[in-house]
Amino acid sequence: MKPSSGTPHSLSGRPVGARRRWLFRLVAVGAALLAAELALQVAALLSPALRRAIFVKDVPWYWTDPRLGALPNPEHPDHDAWGYRNPSVPDRADVVTFGDSQTYGYGVGARDTWPRCLARLGGVSVYSIAFGGWGPIQHLLLWDRAEQLKPHLIVQALYAGNDLWDCYHLVYDLGRLPDLRPPDPDTARAIQEAEEKAPLLNAIRRQTEPVADDGQARPIHQGALGRFARRCAGRIGLCGIALKAYRFANAALLPGDLDEWQRARAATQTEEANRWAIDLGGVRTILTPGYRLVALDMDDPRIREGHRLMLSALSRMQANVRRINATFVVLLIPTKELVFKDFVERAGVDIPPAYSRLIAMEEQVWRRMTDHLDQEGIPWMDALPALRACLSRGESPYPISADGHPNAVGHRAIAEELARELRRRGDIPSGRSQNAGGVR
């Protein structure tokens, strides 16, 4: 018989001491994690800011609202007490900006939106009242918010991509500001006939439906596993931090936008194509001419009516601004398709007919718009040259995906151009204002 070494062994043959050491390590790690979790829970109780930083709560961005169509949710961690994308609600603001998702800043951090950039560049306090799908009609309904902040300057941003449709939808489908409807029976008859033939709301919804599933595997944060992970991340601090780290790495490392561009590039392009992938010397993106054309087709009486409603709303805003002794400026934000127009034409590529028609319609919209603004004596600034200048430098102001919202480069370009123009006009000072420490 082999003599015993004197070290106790388990039935599996592993020394009992080694098993105890591993058990001790597991207990120590568990105790450390428990202590860290308790610390995170205490920190979250003491500081709302830390609570938002630690936990992941899938709070809705907005609620359906019969008056505005959509109402941003004040409980969202990116929103202030009024529901807008600002750090807080100030007592006063030098500048109030009205706009839609191009101003709200879909796809970029709050600090990178052009209103926040304008605050830093102009040395003024800026409060943004903006949300996706909003246009001048919603902003007329929210005018008391702007007046409450006693601004000396109000900037109304107009986006060609959907503002005409938004104005039509709010007045005709939701019944807001019915006094803006025209007394002209021919216009009313043309709109009614067009609606009976093909409701515009249905066409818009068809165009905004997501692209069908291409069969590729979904990221782990989607599906049943993702829902379970988000529930844990909303209650357990360590899970919340882990999920945020995963999302950051996923956004930074996975080539999702590039894959989307490559799939669109391989697709057959037709006149009705919604997705057109282009490559201009390394600057890549996906244009969506068919999608944009539905909401910019000036041959449609409902879109023409939306344009007229927009002009009427701007005239009312000008009157409101004069009443409170402030200044009014309109900022024109083009579609991504118009920004890329000159570069696409110089590239010598085959241009889909839908793209050419879209460009013609948008240029018509802006001509009519600027003529009206000049007649009314309303100052305006066009963001188109600044966004095209980014492309000339080899920087794309838009993501490579089909997203039509500016990226951080585009937002900063808009803010820089607006700050220069406002400073030239004397609407913002060359130095910092007394209110400059307010909203950032």
Image (tube, rainbow, N blue to C red):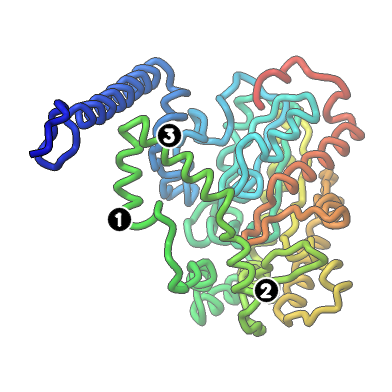
Number of the label disc, if any, that sits on residue 224: 1
Q: Position of residue 253 (x, y in %)?
A: 57, 51
Q: Amino acid at mark 3?
A: Ile
Relative side of 180 to 125, left or right: left
Residue occupying image coordinates x 61% and y 55%: 180
> Circle 1: is it few (<14), some (14-19), or many (20+) Cα within 10 Å?
few
Which quarter shows the C terminus?
top right
Q: Amino acid at mark 1?
A: Ala
Q: CA distance from mark 2 to mark 1?
A: 33 Å
Q: Position of residue 330 (x, y in %)?
A: 77, 45
Residue occupying image coordinates x 42% and y 29%: 54
**Which residue is most to the right?**
424
Residue under label 3, please give it: 241
Tell me if residue 301 can be seen. no
Relative side of 122 to 197, left or right: right
Residue under label 2, please give it: 276
- Which image quadrant for residue 345? bottom right
Q: Amino acid at mark 2?
A: Trp
Disc 2, SS = strand
